[in-house]
Image (cartoon, rainbow, N blue to C red):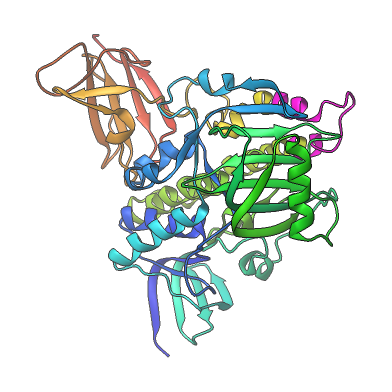
Amino acid sequence: MSEKRIDILIVGAGPVGLLCAHLAHLSGLSAVIIDKSEGPLQVGRADALNARSLQLLEIAKLFDELYPLGKPCNTSSVWSNGQFVSRQSKWWEELEGCLHKHFLMIGQSYVENLVDKKLARAGVPVRRATAVEDIQVSEGGCLTKLSTGELIRSQFVIGADGSRSFVRGHFNISFEITRPQIIWAVIDGIIETDFPKVPEIIVFQSETSDVAWIPREGPIDRFYIRMDRKDFTIDEAVSKIQRAMRPHSVRFREIAWFSQFSVKESVAEKFQYGDRVFLAGDACHIHSVNGGQGLNTGLADAFNLIWKLKMVLKSGASMDLLKSYESERKPVALSVIETSGELVRSTKYSETGTHAEDYVRIVRKRAGNITGMGIRYGSDEIAGTRLFDFEVFDGTRATRIYSLLDYARFTLILFGEGEINFEIPKSTQVLRIHRGKRGGGYWSRECPYVDQAILVRPDSYIQLAATLVGR
């Protein structure tokens, strides 16, 4: 039987797997992506992209098509017995180096359908109704047998195949799950209500805090309802919403999606098997939906991983670079578990009986995770931090620094008129940003990196910084 030879086999065509394939294509890597499903998601699941994801999607050239489809939201409020209690958005307003200081409320299906279509147009369509039967790993790569009978020889395999990952199980990677016995219903639908609708997240305080109202794209609204038992009906879930919103009334005119989920928390023991197999997204970390971090954390996994595979395959980097995927992303996953865990437990347990207000206080304390803008790699003063976003002009045309980054390569940005005294890495994009208005070339009125040279990784984290010479 003939074998197909490629750079990367991606198992799972959820948003993380799709993004891995898209980024691989941008990086000039050959990839095959397979999934058991017949097509991309149409309704349900994740509901928000955070500020960091929006920055990353700009680098991936997905932002412009996706952003107009969603609804910006940066405010959370607490209501009790029909009365307004408090409203907060300070954790967004305080963000530095961030253009989009909000969530973009948008269903996961929009992300999946957009990337799925882009891959098809690029000649890298998802192979649907296809599963993995076996993966063999050797020093030279991976040999994977598909349910179609086809054999694929790849340099690497990425398991982005969800919480029940075949890839993770096949290589016996431990994934011990904690179940805090908290069960939620989720309803997406079109409602009629006399409650004053606003584009903000509303947490209702009754006996506890068991109902949250989430704005969504278009006419859709989402409700999360803590039920704490598995045997409930949709009518019982709606009844809880009505109780939380009293004395206001609410009626579902149309229900687009209804589901229930038990909170599960786990981080895989390892994010990779040897140097050839990697896990991403729910395959290596799962947690409560509270804080909207699941989709966003998975997307960041993809951005962290693919450029490193490209550096090994195309630029002669050592395989040791790949070890940094786990060392950078596993601590992030653990911090996400802590954040979502503290949030979900606060809806049920409160020493003072102020569950909803407790929830909002935790959001502010954990804003670095929730907005995505506090994630960093390492403890150096600047290396490992995200590149701040700011306005840049190309002559008279205004743009943003993130619009100038290229996921396929490093970018060296020279802020000022000085020079550098080190060798520029091969294939690096070099940008000079002048201070003050210029008729041609890039310039900026305000810049957080004056008289510095900043080497930026493809995923827009800073690799190193140096002072320009002769400035």
Above or below: residue 224 compared with residue 256: above
Q: Which residue is drawn at 36% across and 51% down?
A: 316
Residue most extreme to the top:
471
Q: Residue at x 29, y 15 (%)?
A: 468
Q: Nearer the viewer, residue 103 or 367?
A: 103
Judge left or right: residue 342 versus residue 36.
Answer: right
Q: Which residue is drawn at 33% across and 47% down?
A: 65
Judge left or right: residue 340 versus residue 214.
Answer: right
Q: Nearer the viewer, residue 76 or 92?
A: 76
Residue most extreme to the left:
439
The percent coordinates of residue 109 (x first, y second) are 49, 57
- The segment highlighted magenta reads 343-362
Q: Nearer the viewer, residue 247 or 469?
A: 247
The percent coordinates of residue 361 (x first, y second) are 71, 23
The C terminus sits in image quarter: top left
Judge left or right: residue 51 versus residue 46.
Answer: left
The percent coordinates of residue 337 (x first, y second) are 71, 41
- Is residue 349 in the magenta section? yes
